[in-house]
Each structure stands twice: as structure tokens, then as C-alpha cells.
Image (cartoon, helix red, strand yellow):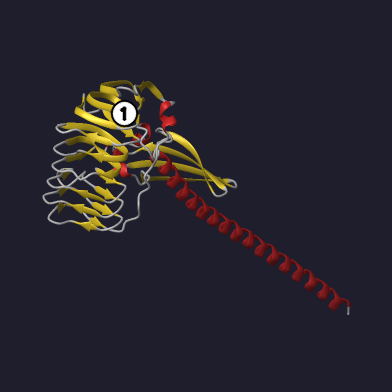
Amino acid sequence: MRKRRGSAILYVMVMLVIMTGVTLTYSALGNAAWTIQTRREQAVTATLAFDGATLKAAYDAGLGKYSYPSTQSVTVGNYTCSVIVSDNSTNLGHSLSMSSTLSLGSRTYSDTRVTALKMPVSMFFYALASNTAATVGDHNTLGAASANGDLYCGGNVTLGAHNTINGDVESTGTIAQGSATVTGSQLTSVVPISFPVPNPSDYSSFSILNLLNILFGNHISGQAFLIPYSVVFCQGATTINGTFTGKGIIFVQGDVTVNGTMTYGSANDELAVIVTGNVTVQNPTASFVGYWYCGGTFTGLDNSSLSRGSIATNVLADSDHFSINYDPTIWNTPGEANRMKLPGFWP
């Protein structure tokens, strides 16, 4: 009996040891599985956070909210990524280089990618854009060599005979092409682009020169912008002509008449003319320049040429024999539309 009892005790002890070993083994396997699963979940979380962070950073870059290179803290949900944003346009046009890091628990995840510069939809990305239905008269040319001549219309658009649109035609309504030539796509019923409304006080607070002449009107015969992206603020009717050098903005709270030729002094010059009222290009104005915003009606393009720039207007008057050569600088250069204080990008 004692021998059997001793054998039983030994058997129980061996089983306890085996069972304890098995339990510890399963516990170790469970911890390992939990660690692997946690790391996989963290990796997925990091990837999704990087996707959102780079998209947000690229959009803010398009708005010109920071220069390059710069490090930004971008929050996506409950996670904050550190994103180094660099201009990559020398390697690939209209692109950014993004290097991001994110700490989750005791681990740090990293991500490097090239992404497109995300720009807000804007009428300034077209050679000619009208916020309302428009008729584009005869013998007009937008762009050249099948490029830089895109046309947008917030309503039905009618193209006159002998027009050449070197690019796309987009309309929130219909397109009556007639015998006009369109080198790109014709898109109807597109989503409307919001027509921005600038606040005059935003521009007057940045101005280096304020012009006010209610009796005779303001006259600008050329301007040298010695301070880049500075503002000349005009209150009341204004006439404009002459040579413009540097990079600057003319804001007119009133109507504008282009009463003579406008030119740039060099290929690097840029001008934005922002008008709350109407714009009239007097005939014969041989040529004029700049990014034009017109809160009223743009009239009198007959026999004139916008040699480098674009027009975004609320209403476009029917005009013949004009040409527009789009200036893609604001599209190709990150933040330039913001620095030029174009409505919809600034402030």
C-alpha cells in the first residue's frame, strides 16, 4: 500500500509539473501573439495617419500656409504626425516630398513619399473664367500649342466662330461649340466653382500706398513693386496702364479702365489686379498683363491681348478678336497664389 501511495504521489507531482509547463508555454505564446497583433494594428494605424497627414499638409502647402522646407505637426484623429514638407517640383512638376514620423507606444514609425501639391479649385487656374453664363465672340484665341487656354463658365457657354481654345472647356451647364476649335476636353454639368468675394479691409491693411481721388479718379501709370507682394490700394474709379516691375497687387474698390498698353519689365514680374466693380479695356489697348479678378462685368476685350495672366470675372461681356495667354506661375509654384493675395487663397 505504501509503495502504491508513493507512486500515486509521484504521478501527481509529475502531472503538476507538466501542466504548469504547458500553461506557461501557452501563456508565452499568447503574449507573443498579442504583441504581434498589436504591432500589426499600430502599423495599420500609422499608415492611415500618414495618409491623412500628408494629404492635409499638401493642401495647406497649396494654400501657401508655410514655406519650404518646413516641419509641420499634423493631427489626424487622435494621432499627431511630424511631417517634413519639401518642394519637389525640380524633380517632378507640381509635387512635394513628405517625410513623416509617428510614435505609437514604444515604437516610432516613419514614412517617405512624393505627393502632388493639393490646390483648392479656383477660377484662376483657367485662362478665362466666368461665374455666369457667357458668349465668347468670334476670332478669339485662348492659350497656344494646345495648352494653357482652359475656359470655365458657371452656366451655359456659347463659343463663336473661328475661336480656338487650346485646352479644356468646362461648363456647369451646356456648351455650344459651333465651328470653334477645342483641343482638349469638353465637360458639361461640372461642379460649380465658388466665386470668392474679397474683403477690401484685408488689402488696405497691407497696402504700401493708398490712392483716393473721388473727383478725378485714380491714375496708375506703371508701378515698381520694390517690396515683393506689396499692395497698392485704390478707392474709387481707377485707370491703369504702363510698365510693371516686381511682384505686386493692385486692389481697386471701384471700377477700372485699362486705357493704354500694360507690360512687364521682365519675365519674372507678376501683377494681380483685384477689382470689386467693373473692368473696361478701352479699344485700342494693344495688350495688358496680370491676373485679373473682376467682381462685376469685364468688358471691351475687342482687339486686345492679355499677353500673360488670366481673367476671373463675375460676368463676361461678349467680345471679339482677343487672345489670352495663361500664366501658370501660380499653378507651378507652391504658395504663389497665396503670396499674390488672390481671392480664394488669401488671407
Q: Quadrant of residue 88?
A: top left
Please say if 152 is above or below 218. Answer: below
Label 1, residues with CA under 10 Å away: few <14, some 14-19, many ≥20: many
Q: Indicate whether 43 appears above or below 89.
A: below
Residue drawn where x is 38% and y is 35% of the image: 338
**Mark 1 falls on what kind of element?**
loop
Q: Position of residue 339 (x, y in %)?
A: 37, 32
* Horizontal arrangement in the rendering, residue 218 relative to residue 144 (left or right): right
- State which quarter of the image contains the C terminus: top left
Quarter-of-image position of residue 344: top left
Q: In this view, does 223 lie to the left or right of 7?
A: left
| Residue drawn where x is 29% and y is 53% of the image | 155
Q: Quadrant of the N terminus?
A: bottom right
Residue 109, given in percent of the width and then of the height, sits at: 50, 46
- Amino acid carrying label 1: it is Ala
Observer-nearest residue: 112 or 31? 112
x and y percentages locating residue 234 in the rendered image = 35, 26
